[in-house]
Amino acid sequence: MARELVIKVTCGVDAPERANQGVTVAATAAASGVPVSLWLTGEGAWLAVPGRAAELALPLATPVVDLIATVLELGTVTVCGQCAARREITEADVLPGVRIAGAPVFVEEALRDGAQALIY
């Protein structure tokens, strides 16, 4: 069975370097053929709302908008259900292809054989 990555990004524009690192790792792994599930939690949930990822500008870094597009094309992007609810983000508010799911789905993905979970 191939290794897969489950990456949780817990921040957004409040911690741009950490957020960009997590999304960069997700996109790089996905582009390399690794199955990737990117979870956006806490302030990172806003990165799934159209236009909001562009607010995270970091010198010398690939734009988060482009990185998320890569993950969406090659893997999955999920917004934490509770995080979305606290921010009044619904399925209608997120980028096409992004899902909203809760902790049971994260735990299921993180505990799959061959999965490696990383948290940023």
Image (spheres, grey):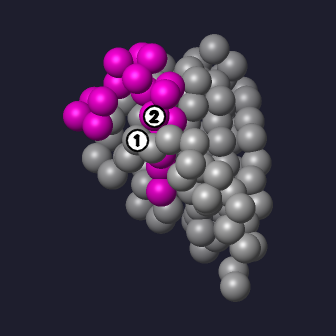
Q: Earlier in the sequence, mark 2 or mark 1?
A: 2
Q: Residue at x 38, y 46 (%)?
A: 98
Q: Which residue is mark 1?
A: 100
Number of residues whose C-alpha sits closer than 10 Å to that of mark 1, classed few (under 14), some (14–19) or many (20 or more): many
Classify residue 116 as left or right of residue 75: right
Check residue 91 for magenta coloring: yes
Q: Whole-percent x and y of residue 90?
A: 30, 30
Q: Whole-percent x and y of residue 16?
A: 66, 23
Classify residue 17 as left or right of residue 68: right
Q: Secondary structure at mark 2?
A: helix
Q: Secondary structure at mark 1?
A: strand
Label disc, if present, on residue 5 of the rendered structure: none
Q: Please state the extent of the stretch shown in magenta in the rendering.
A: 76-93
Q: Residue at x 49, y 28 (%)?
A: 82
Classify residue 70 as left or right of residue 108: left
Q: Whole-percent x and y of residue 99?
A: 38, 46
Depth check, front residue: 5 or 68: 5
Q: Give yes or no for contact between labels 2 and 1 (Cβ–Cβ under 8 Å).
A: yes
Q: Residue at x 76, y 48 (%)?
A: 118
Classify residue 17 as left or right of residue 85: right
Instruction: Please determine whether, in this image, residue 86 is positioned above or below residue 1.
Output: above
Amino acid on which the number 1 mark rests in the picture: Ile
Whether residue 113 is visible to the viewer of this picture, yes or no, is yes
Q: Which residue is mark 2?
A: 81
Q: Residue at x 28, y 47 (%)?
A: 96
Amino acid on which the number 2 mark rests in the picture: Gly
Q: Whole-percent x and y of residue 29?
A: 66, 62
Instruction: Please determine whether, in this image, residue 16 is positioned above or below residue 30.
Output: above
Task: Give the position of the C terminus as an image quadrant.
Answer: top right
